[in-house]
Amino acid sequence: MTKTRQRLQEKKSKVTVHEVARLAGVSESTVSRIMRNQGLVAEATRAKVMETVRSLGYVPNRIAGSLASLDSQLVGVVVPSLSNIVFPEVLQGVSAGLKSSNYQAVISISDYDMDREETLVRGLLAWQPAAILIAGFDHTMATRRMLDQSGVRVVEMMDIDSAPIDIAVGMSHRRAGYAVGQHLIARGYRRFGYVGHDWTADRRARLRYDGLCEALGQAGLSFVAHAIADGQSSVAAGRKQTAQLCATSSVDVAVYSNDDMAVGGIFHCLAAGIRVPDRLAIFGFNGLDIGLELPQPLSTMRSNRFLIGQKAIEAILLAPERPETPSIIDTGFEIFAGATA
Amino acid sequence: MTKTRQRLQEKKSKVTVHEVARLAGVSESTVSRIMRNQGLVAEATRAKVMETVRSLGYVPNRIAGSLASLDSQLVGVVVPSLSNIVFPEVLQGVSAGLKSSNYQAVISISDYDMDREETLVRGLLAWQPAAILIAGFDHTMATRRMLDQSGVRVVEMMDIDSAPIDIAVGMSHRRAGYAVGQHLIARGYRRFGYVGHDWTADRRARLRYDGLCEALGQAGLSFVAHAIADGQSSVAAGRKQTAQLCATSSVDVAVYSNDDMAVGGIFHCLAAGIRVPDRLAIFGFNGLDIGLELPQPLSTMRSNRFLIGQKAIEAILLAPERPETPSIIDTGFEIFAGATA
DNA sequence: CTGTTAGCGCGTTCAG
DNA sequence: CTGAACGCGCTAACAG
C-alpha cells in the first residue's frame, strides 16, 4: 500500500464492515444484513453487532454498496435556475417525495444553457441514478439520446405540451394561456397588451402567449401592444416594461409573462398612481405567494410546482423500470380571479 | 450470473471499460487513462478508443471509479428550506463555485428539523463526500460528532457568531443588528417597534434582534412594542403583524426580522394608506431583490448569500484536507439606506 | 440463522 | 507508451 492510499484512508473514518465483523466476532455478511435490515438475524447477534457499530461510529460506504448491488439509490435533478422561486418549489416537492425513501437527490443547475445541461446530464448518468428529473423538453440532441439510451427513468417536468422521452409531469401552458384569454374576454376586456421577457430560454412563457393569442384570435381580437424585456423575467423588468407600455399605448388590460413581471407592473402602477384595475387591469401567470399579499391580490393563473416535484418522484418510485410507452401526468392549473383584473 | 443481476444489467446501458477495451483492441488501463486525460497515450490510440467510446455511448461508472480511487468528487449540502429565496441563492453560489470543478453537489433539505438533519448528514457521509456544507450552527450532538469525526471538510454557512467545527462562512448577524440599531438612532428614530417571526428555527433572526437591543440599550432606548408571528417568516405574516402593531401601539419605526416580513409591512401600509416613512418607517433585513423594486426602495441590511455559497466551495477546493484549527470567512453586510426609513 | 465465495467496474501500481 | 494484477468496501447467492 502506497503513501497516497494511506493518506486517503487516514482522512476518512476508515471503519469498514471488515473491522466491525472482526470486533463483533461475526462474518461481514451478517453485519451487512443487519445494516440493511434485511434477512433474518438473531436478536442477540444484532444487538452485539449494533453495539460495535455504534462504538466505532461505523457508517456503511454507500459507494461500495451501490457498486455491489448495482443500485445507486440516487436521483439526478437538473433545473435551469434557482433565482426564481418556481424551481426551488419543485425541488421542495422532490425532497418531500424522497423523504420516506432511501433515495438521495443530486441537483445540478444549468443556467438555462443547453450545452451545460448536456454536461450535467452526462455527469449525473455516470452515477447510475435510478432516474433523472429534468425541467422542460428543450435539450440538445445528445442529451436526449443519452437520456433515452441510459434506460433510466426520465421525468421531464413543468410542461406537458410535447411528447416526453418517458414521463412528463406538469401542466399545459398552452391551454393555460388559452383559458386566461377566454377568462379576460369574458370579463369584458378588449384592448390587450402583453408584457413579457425573452422567450429563447423560457419556452413555457412562449406557449402561454400562443394560447393567449389563440383565444384572442377566436374572439376576433389580438394584442394591441407588446413590451418585451431583453433578459430573464424579474420584478424590475416588469416594472420597466409596464412604464414603457403605458407611455406608448393605451390598453385596458396587460397580461404578463409571469407573476414576477406582473408584480413589477403593480409596483409601477402604485408608484405612478395608475388605478388598478380601472385604468389598467393586470394579469400574471404562476400564482406566486407574493401576489396574494399585494395590497390587492394579483389576478393570476395558479399552478402547483411543489406537486410537480412530488408527483415526479412518486411516479418513478412506483415504477422503477421504464415502461414501453411514455406517459403524462397533468398537475393542472386554475385561474385565480384576484382583484387586479 | 443470476436472473436478477441480468435484469439489473440490461436496464442500465451496461457498456463498461471492458467492452470498450475489447472492441478498440487495447487494454482496460488504456481506456481508463484516456477517459481521465491522465498519463501519456499515443494520439492514434486515443483517437481509436474515443471513436469506440462515442459509438458505444460509453459513460464511465463514477461509482466504481470513486470506489477504486477512494475519492468521490461529491460535496454534500444541507439547507433548512428552499421556500425563502435566501437558501436557493446560497445554492446558486455553490453551483457557480463547483462549475469549473469535477465535483457534484448532493443537496438535502432538513425542513428546519434537527433530527431530520442528523439523518440527512448520516446519509450524505455514507457517500464519502469531500466536504459537507451545512447551514448554521444548530445541530444535534450526534450530527456534530459525525461531522467532526468524519474528517471531511465541514463548512457551516450563513453565520459566523459561533465557533465552527472547521470553517464558517457568512456574516455576523449580531453585529448587523447592532449596526442597524445605530443607523436608525442616528437618523433620529426613538420609538422602535419590532415585527418578527418564530425564533426557535431561526437563530440568525434572534442574533440580529440581540444586536438591535444592544444598540438601543446603549442609547438608553428599548423596543416599545413587539409583534411576533407564530411560524416561519412570510409576506403574509409581515402584513398581518404590522396591522397588529399599528392597531395596538404607536411607534415611529418598525424593524423587521427579515425582508419578507418587511415587504408585508409595506403592503399593509399601502393598503391602509399609512405614509412611509413619515408616519411609519420600515427597515428590513437581508436585502432581497424585491425590496429594491417596491414603489419606494426598501431600507434594509444587505448580505450576499450567493457569495457565501461560492466562498464555501472555494475554501474547500483550495484546501481539501481539514486543517488543525478552524477558520472563519466573513462575507460582510452593508446597510442600504433605501427610502422607507 | 450464519458463513463462504465471487464478483460489481474501475483506478493504481508496477513491469515491460 | 501499454498491459496485467490487484484491490477499493460491499452485496448476492448459495451452502450449510
Image (cartoon, coloured by chain):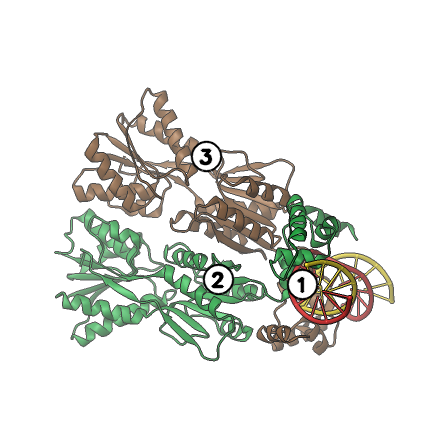
Chain colours: A brown, B green, C red, D yellow
Q: Amino acid at mark 1?
A: Asn
Q: Is residue A92 left or right of residue A148?
A: left
* Discs 3, 1: same chain: yes
Residue A277 circle label: none
Instruction: Give the crowd class for mark 3: few <14, some 14-19, many >=20 residues within 10 Å.
Output: many
Which residue is under mark 3?
Answer: A172
Residue that carries the numbered disc 2 in the rendered image: B77
Residue A160 percent location from the top left of the image: 49, 36
Q: Quadrant of residue B125?
A: bottom right
Are the numbered discs 3 and 2 placed on the same chain, yes or no? no
Label 1 in the same subunit as label 2 = no
Question: What is the distance, in whole Å, between disc 1 and disc 2 at their CAs?
Answer: 27 Å
Residues tagged 3 and 2 counted as in contact (Cβ below 8 A): no
Horizontal placement of B162 versus A21: left or right?
left
Camera-nearest label, 3 or 1: 3
Q: A146 or B214: nearer the eye?
A: A146
Mark with earlier residue (3, 1) = 1
Q: Is residue B223 among what the camera can see?
A: no
Q: Nearer the viewer, residue B294 or A98?
A: B294
Q: Is residue A132 visible?
A: yes
Quarter containing the C terminus of chain B:
bottom left
Q: Chain of mark 1?
A: A
**Location of mark 1 (residue):** A37
